[in-house]
Amino acid sequence: MSAAPLVSVIISSYNHAPYVEDAIRSVLAQTYPRVELLVVDDGSTDDSAERIARLQAEYGFDFRVQENKGLTRTLNDAVARARGELIAPLGSDDIMLPERLAIQTAYLADKPEVGICAGNIELIHADGTPFCDARQSRELPFRRLDFDDMFNERKPGPAAPTLLIRREAFERVGGFDPAIRLEDLYIELKITHAGYFIDVLGDVLARYRKHDTNSYRNLRFMTDAILRIYRDYADDPRYDEVRLRFLNSMFVKSANRDRALARELLAQLPLRSWNGKTVRGMLRYLFSRPSR
């Protein structure tokens, strides 16, 4: 295995004390032999740093504590000192399955055109127990995505906890933008726009933990971040279509969860762009009780 590529797994942790130890242990349990682990505590105010330090004393991985810089700046700094040919950012609340990196590195070995390899996920509750609801399943078949697939959402996108990024592709697009905190969509669009593919395997490679502080629950954050990412492609002839479709989707989601945001989104939707989602959002806004 001496010729096998080194994989740099990067965990940026912020106030994930109940979860970060599981994330770290899942990296240490990988069957793939050539892994370097870099963990950064990004200014946590809980006891995350103390928990990580105990594990670092036992296993000797790279661990640094810093004042809060934000996720994307922290990831860029860690990649700059990482030595791996392949980069795997891992959320400090997520879990790698043991064969994950072995499966992905074997797949990428003869595919230089693939900038990102990903896979399926299992959903777990905050306490680590699995979701039993079949509607929560994320087991989808293999698919190859290019920029048009990603920008137009023609196929299901890759799951963030499974991204394995080719360093060459990452550096070619300049890494993450420190001003944009939604790092996964940003880098996926940048890398496919540069001509690489994203290949999503049918294998289940990670467990994604759903809890109250998941970024996707913050609808205003998600809306602002995605609209900012899309603006990089304002010259694309499909930009208006993509933007309006996204506004409609977020209007539906926010209609009974964040009514102030829903009103702002509706004001940005011209009548010509109204569709079934808009109507469904209006009905939710008018007749549903606000929910979290």
Image (cartoon, grey):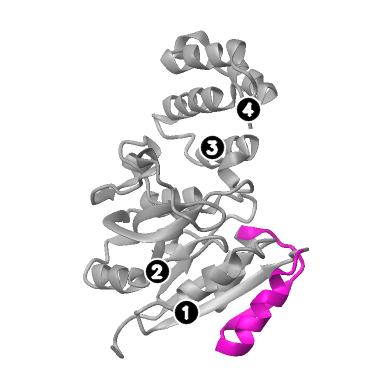
Q: Amino acid at mark 2?
A: Glu
Asked if residue 162 lies left or right of residue 223, the reply is left
Number of the front mark, 1 or 4: 4
Which of the two discs, 2 and 1, labels the residue nearer the N terminus? 1
Number of the front mark, 2 or 1: 1
Q: Nearer the viewer, residue 100 or 207?
A: 207
Residue 125 bears which disc, if any? Answer: none
- Report helix, strand or loop for mark 4: loop
Span shown in magenta: 46-71
Q: CA distance from mark 1 to mark 3?
A: 39 Å
Q: Residue at x 49, y 52 (%)?
A: 184
- Per the image, the residue denoted by label 2 is 168
Location of residue 97 in the rendering, given as x and y in whole percent from the top left corner: 39, 67
- Per the image, the residue denoted by label 1 is 28
Q: Nearer the viewer, residue 66 or 28?
A: 28
- Per the image, the residue denoted by label 4 is 291
Q: Counting other residues with Cα less than 10 Å from the Cα at mark 4, is it few (<14), some (14-19), or many (20 or more)?
A: few
